[in-house]
Amino acid sequence: MKKYIAGCLVFLLGTVLQAQQAMHESDETLLKEYPVLFQQQAAEYRALCYQAFNMAMAQIDALPRRKLRKGKLAIITDLDETIIDNSYHEARLIREGKSFSSESWKAWTSRSAATAVPGAVEFLQAAKQKGISIFYISNRDMADVNSTLLNLQKLQLPDADTAHLLLMSSTSAKEPRRQRVMQNHNVIMLMGDNLNDFLTVFEKRPADARKAATDSLRLEWGKRFIVLPNIMYGEWENAIYEYKRNLSPAEKEAMRQEKLIGF
């Protein structure tokens, strides 16, 4: 009888643990689904993108003609989730129950199938018509240069050539590449979905330090710095996890809970 009861208890415990695991996996799936659904389905997302590019265009339109005539003006922009939309890759990973991998990313980029972020093409074409050069600084790998250029050319983005596309070669830090552009151009605007796209002060910094740096630059946002929305991934998430790698789902959940501010 005791063995029978013990066996029942073990069975019940196993069932409870399986149920908890299933609930946890369900929660993790929802955490991934909502950001992708927001980017693909929310009219609010499109509105935020149009708002960003409208502000950017207003800044370009306000430039004195003499500054435009002098030439050598440039815009530096990120690509992924700033100019082109990769939510399709994220959606497929969710459907297949997989996590990000370099293999899955390569399979996606090789298709040259990313669509344009709402308002991006029109803005960059208008800026180019005013004589402003466009430089794309992305942390895509150099092996993706041909497929990336093809993608940009399909979207009819200006300056879609090797001279204006600076991909990652040795370091993910973008400042050296920004400096290369600034050697020969007057960079009047930077665009990105990640604050690392603007200044090194944001790189690998705690969340509070990133917020403080953002506050100190409050007059630049919407003017020289144009930020696009991206809640699917980014440095903000790494900051929550304190840049620790190989955390388990349970450890990540605990850190997220710790960062929540209630009342």
Image: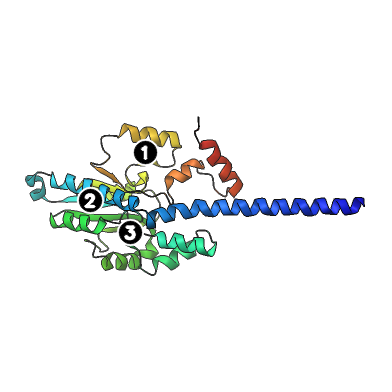
* Distance from Cα at disc 1 to Cα at disc 3: 25 Å
Where does the image place residue 165, in percent across and percent down from the top left?
29, 59
| Residue in the foreground of this view, choosing between 161 and 184 | 161
Question: Which residue is the site of mark 2?
Answer: 75
Question: Which residue is the site of mark 1?
Answer: 201
Question: Which residue is the site of mark 3?
Answer: 84
| Residue in the foreground of this view, choosing between 50 and 166 | 50
Q: Judging from the image, what secondary structure is the residue with disc 1 in?
A: helix
* Distance from Cα at disc 1 to Cα at disc 2: 20 Å
Where does the image place residue 109, in percent across and percent down from the top left?
39, 65
Task: Please identify, in this view, whether the residue under mark 2 or under mark 3 is nearer the observer.
Answer: 3
User: From this viewpoint, is residue 244 visible?
Assistant: yes
Above or below for 153 versus 134: below
- Within 10 Å of disc 3 (Cα), the crowding (few <14, some 14-19, many 20+) is many
Q: Which residue corresponds to the image point at 24% horizontal and 62% vertical from the top-left? A: 157
Please give left or right for residue 112 compared with residue 107 in the image.
Answer: left
Q: Which residue corresponds to the image point at 61% horizontal and 46% vertical from the top-left? A: 250
